[in-house]
C-alpha cells in the first residue's frame, strides 16, 4: 500500500512538472493571434489609415507576456495635440558620376612598357571597382527615394489625421482593458501568477523618423507619457469563468503611467559593452544594429532588446546623414557571398561566452533575478536560421563564476538559449 502511495505521489509530481513545460510553437502562435487582435482593436477605435508596424510580444518564463505597442502606432493615434511636425529630410547625393583617366600624362621620365602595362591593369581594376560601386549607389538611390516617398506619405497622413477630428476619440486604457478581459485568455499555457502586460511606448522616447537637417523642431514633452497596464493570468481566468464580474476584474488591472526608463549605470554599461563587442569593425559574425535598449522588470530582472545583422544581408554600402549632407560608407572587407548559415553557429556559441564574461558586470540586480537578451536577427531571406534568439541567465550563476565558485563549463551549461524560427 505504501509503495502504491509513493508511486502516486511520484506520478503526481512528475505530471505537475511536465505540465509546466511550454510548447514554444503554440505559444508563438497564440502571441501572433493576440498581437493581431490588439492591433485591430487600436485601428478600429482610432479610425486611422495608418497601418504601422506590428506590435511586439514576448513570453518570459516565470514573468509572463509583454506586449509593446510601437512608437509608430502611438504617434499616429495619440491625438492632434501630441503630433510633432516631421522636418524635411536633406537631399540625397548626386549619383551621376563618370570614371575617366587620361593615360597621356606628361612625365619627366619615360616609363617602360612593363610599367605602362601594370598601370593599365590597375586602371582597369579601378574602373571595375568603380562600376561596381556605382551600381550599388544606384541601388541605394532607389532605396533613398523610397524612403523620401515614405516621408512624404507620412506628411499626408499627418494632415489627414489632424484634420479628421476623430483622432482624439481613442481611449487607450479602455482598449487595453478590453483586450485583457475579452481576449487575453486566448494565450494558453500561462501559469496563474504570470502576468499579461501591455506597454504603450511614448512616441517621444524613440521618434519614428529623426532628421538632423533643416526644419527640425523640438517636441513638446509636457504630458506626453505612455501607459502600461497589467493583470495576472489567474484574474483573467477568474473573470472568464464567471468567478468575478467585470467591475471586479477592472479593479485588479493595474494601470499606470509609463514613465521614461531611468538609466541604471551598470545596465547602461552592459548595453554599451554589447554594442562595442558586436560592432561592425570587431565582430566576426553578426553585428549590432542601432543601440541596444533595456527594460527593468520589477521583482524579476532585466531584458535587453537587441537587433543584429550581417553584411550578407545588408550589403556593403550605407548612407547616413549629418546636418544637411550625406556620407557614404563602402565596406569591402566582407561581401554578399558570406553565408549567414555559416555565421550563425559561431554567433550562437559566442553569445553564451559574452553573457558569461560580461554579464557579471551587472551589479544592481539580486541573485535570484534574471538577465535576458532578446535578439532579433536580420538575416538573408533564404537562410535557415532563427528569426530571434533569447539568451537568459540567473544573476547568481554569473556571480558564482565571477567569484570562482562555479566552473566555466557549469556556468556555460546554466545559460539558456531559445530559438524562434
Image: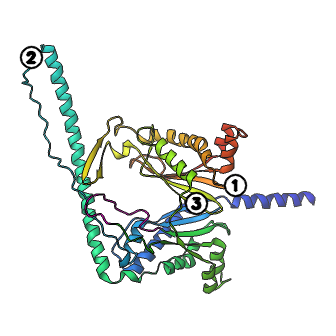
Q: Which numbered disc covers residue 368?
A: 1
Q: Quadrant of residue 353 in the image?
A: top right
139 or 240: nearer the eye? 139
Q: Per the image, is 213 magenta?
A: yes
State the separation of the CA atoms marked 2 and 3: 71 Å
Residue 357 location, x and y as percent? 59, 40
Disc 2 versus disc 1: nearer the observer: 2
Label 2 neighbour load within 10 Å: few <14, some 14-19, many 20+: few
Residue at the (29%, 68%) spot, across then down: 154
Q: Residues within 10 Å of mark 1 (few under 14, many from 20)?
A: few
Residue 167, image x and y in percent?
Answer: 37, 80
Residue 53 image point, x, y percent: 40, 65
The correct choice, above or below, for 150 with respect to 111 in the image is below
Q: Which residue is mark 3?
A: 296
Question: Is 296 left, or right, of 225 in this rendering?
Answer: right
Q: Left or right? Give the position of 254 relative to 315.
A: right
Tag 2 residue: 108
| Residue situated in front as seen by the camera: 257 or 229 | 257
Q: Is residue 134 above or below residue 295?
A: above
Q: Who is closer to the viewer here, 182 or 291?
A: 291
| 244 w.r.t. 16: above or below | below
Colour scheme employed for the rendering of this structure: rainbow
Amino acid at each position: 500500500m505504501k509503495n502504491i502511495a509513493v508511486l502516486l505521489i511520484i506520478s503526481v509530481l512528475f505530471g505537475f512538472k511536465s505540465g509546466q513545460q511550454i510548447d514554444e510553437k503554440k505559444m508563438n502562435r497564440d502571441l501572433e493571434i493576440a498581437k493581431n487582435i490588439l492591433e485591430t482593436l487600436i485601428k478600429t477605435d482610432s479610425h486611422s489609415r495608418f497601418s504601422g508596424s506590428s506590435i511586439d510580444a514576448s513570453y518570459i518564463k516565470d514573468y509572463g507576456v509583454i506586449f509593446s505597442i510601437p512608437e509608430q502606432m502611438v504617434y499616429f493615434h495619440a491625438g492632434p495635440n501630441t503630433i510633432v511636425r516631421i522636418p524635411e529630410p536633406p537631399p540625397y547625393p548626386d549619383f551621376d558620376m563618370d570614371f575617366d583617366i587620361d593615360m597621356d600624362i606628361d612625365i619627366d621620365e619615360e616609363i617602360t612598357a612593363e610599367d605602362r602595362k601594370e598601370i593599365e591593369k590597375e586602371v582597369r581594376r579601378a574602373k571595375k571597382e568603380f562600376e561596381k560601386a556605382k551600381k550599388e549607389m544606384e541601388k541605394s538611390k532607389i532605396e533613398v527615394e523610397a524612403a523620401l516617398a515614405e516621408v512624404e506619405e507620412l506628411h499626408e497622413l499627418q494632415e489627414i489625421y489632424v484634420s479628421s477630428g476623430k483622432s482624439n476619440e481613442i481611449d487607450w486604457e479602455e482598449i487595453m482593458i478590453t483586450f485583457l478581459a475579452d481576449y487575453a485568455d486566448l494565450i494558453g499555457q500561462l501559469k496563474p501568477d504570470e502576468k499579461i502586460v501591455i506597454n504603450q511606448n511614448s512616441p517621444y522616447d524613440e521618434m519614428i523618423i529623426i532628421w538632423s537637417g533643416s526644419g527640425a523642431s523640438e517636441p513638446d514633452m509636457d504630458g506626453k507619457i505612455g501607459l502600461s497596464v497589467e493583470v495576472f493570468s489567474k484574474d483573467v481566468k477568474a473573470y472568464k469563468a464567471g468567478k468575478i464580474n467585470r467591475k471586479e476584474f477592472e479593479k485588479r488591472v493595474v494601470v499606470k503611467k509609463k514613465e521614461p526608463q531611468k538609466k541604471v549605470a551598470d545596465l547602461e554599461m552592459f548595453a554599451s559593452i554589447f554594442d562595442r563587442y558586436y560592432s561592425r569593425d570587431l565582430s566576426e559574425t553578426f553585428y549590432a544594429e542601432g543601440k541596444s535598449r533595456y527594460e527593468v522588470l520589477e521583482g524579476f530582472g532585466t531584458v535587453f532588446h537587441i537587433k543584429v545583422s550581417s553584411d550578407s544581408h545588408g550589403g556593403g554600402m550605407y548612407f547616413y546623414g549629418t546636418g544637411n549632407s550625406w556620407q557614404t560608407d563602402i565596406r569591402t572587407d566582407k561581401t554578399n557571398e558570406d553565408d549567414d548559415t555559416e555565421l550563425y553557429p559561431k554567433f550562437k556559441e559566442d553569445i553564451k561566452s559574452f553573457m558569461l564574461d560580461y554579464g557579471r558586470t551587472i551589479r544592481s540586480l539580486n541573485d535570484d533575478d534574471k538577465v535576458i537578451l532578446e535578439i532579433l536577427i536580420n538575416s538573408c531571406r533564404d537562410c535557415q536560421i532563427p528569426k530571434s534568439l533569447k539568451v537568459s541567465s540567473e544573476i547568481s550563476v554569473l556571480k558564482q563564476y565571477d567569484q570562482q565558485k562555479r566552473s566555466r563549463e557549469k556556468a556555460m551549461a546554466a545559460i539558456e538559449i531559445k530559438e524562434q524560427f
